[in-house]
Image (cartoon, grey):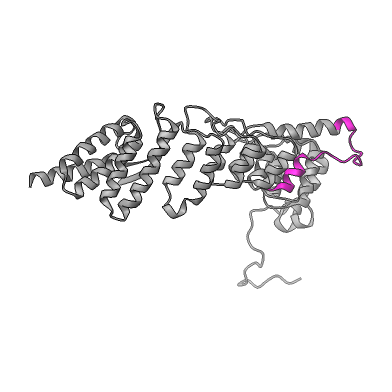
Amino acid sequence: MSSPPANCPDSSPSTSIPPSEVYHTSTCGSILHTLPTNVPSEIFTYLRHGKLDAFHRSLNIYHKDIIQMKNENEQTVLHVLTTHAYPYSWVRLLIMFECDPCCQDCDGYTAAHYAVERDDIEMLKALTTRFHSNVKLFSDEQKIVIHERCLKALSLRQTDGLTVFMLACHHESIKCLDYLLELNINDVHLQDNFGDTCLHYAVCRRNQNLVTKLINQCNANVNGGVKQRPSVLDILQFNRDQRKAFERSSEDSIEQILLSNNALNRCQIRRIVKKRKRSHDDTEAVLPTLTIGHASTVTNSQIETARSYARLAFSLHSQRKFDDAKEHYKLAMNSISNDILDWADYAFKLALIHKFHGENQSALDLLQQALVVRKQFENETEDIAEIQRVADSIKKLSLM
């Protein structure tokens, strides 16, 4: 064989792989033949990239090692198969190899939590269905033990304290929720780490069908949860207040369901907007948050009466029917005590009408009272700043 001309470069690209390197480790060689492995990084790479044939060859030989493996997120191969929505037969195979369905990752999730999060009912069934009597690999006693372990996973809580049932309500995973109810699993009365229940999630989501299911089918307590936190009725009313009048039909319908089951107010949720200086450019960043104001001396009926007057007052105010709006603001204020945030809201609105009519002293008196109430619950919020701006503008007018 003749050697290449002196001015012709070698046709082989330079490589760092020694000539003696085995061929199956190359990209092309791995297609032709992949050796079984029990190296965790290689196993999780197979799953991450969908190389199920290579995973299967390894599983057949090293299944005792593989079912114990965890990745950097503390996830088992069962977690990864579930989160990637691989065919359900793989999940059944891993459970057959006794991969533990109760293992929890760094977020406290079991594989069942991930199935429910996507409302993947078939995956959830694959994780929980008992092996058929025709499966001869196990004794009946072993099948019972495996099945009980699968069901136990449904009672485990992730880091925020949610079971699979609670997570189904949180994510509105109705298909999985119905399946769990078929299994006689009902965690509707359980509280998460913050003291809230499934019904709180359903009301937050504005999901009337889910609210109805939890109350009528699951016997949810409409006044459940930690008493120092907002009730489902408090959440409903906060949601409604964030929406325009023509967008509130869902809240109105849910409210009727809650009130017909004797739901009560406990607290008031407030949206607080704080301004904070950015260190790098000295500009202000707006940081909206939520806070809770307690008003234990005011009854549910008093608050709702006041809010009914206030809703009508807001409508009249927007129509520039100031005299009628003023009277309804007064009715709202007279329906509740003057030491809660609702009262401060109505006082501020009434002060604006007094300012419009040139009744500056009446406006200032109301603004001062509203400011005192707000400062009992809040500090440096946008609402406080707005009251102060209006008061300052009136004072400037008085000096002119």
- Residue shown at the point (61%, 43%) measured from the top left: 212
Rendered-image quadrant of the N terminus? bottom right
Residue 53 is situated, as x and y percent measured from the top left of the image, at: 78, 52
Q: Quadrant of residue 58?
A: top right
Q: Quadrant of residue 187?
A: top right
Q: Give the vertical position of 30 relative to 40 (above or below).
A: below
Residue 284 is situated, as x and y percent measured from the top left of the image, at: 30, 45
Of 257 and 127, nearer the camera is 257
Of 2 and 56, nearer the camera is 56
Residue 286 visible within the image: yes
Residue 86 is situated, as x and y percent measured from the top left of the image, at: 72, 50
> The magenta stretch spans which residues?
120-142
Q: Give the vertical position of 77 relative to 11 (above or below).
A: above
On the rendered structure, is 150 left or right of 380?
right
Q: Give the vertical position of 152 relative to 8 (above or below).
A: above
- Residue shown at the point (42%, 38%) measured from the top left: 304
On the rendered structure, is 118 left or right of 361?
right
- Residue shown at the point (37%, 43%) measured from the top left: 309
Residue 68 is situated, as x and y percent measured from the top left of the image, at: 73, 34
Of 90 and 171, nearer the camera is 171
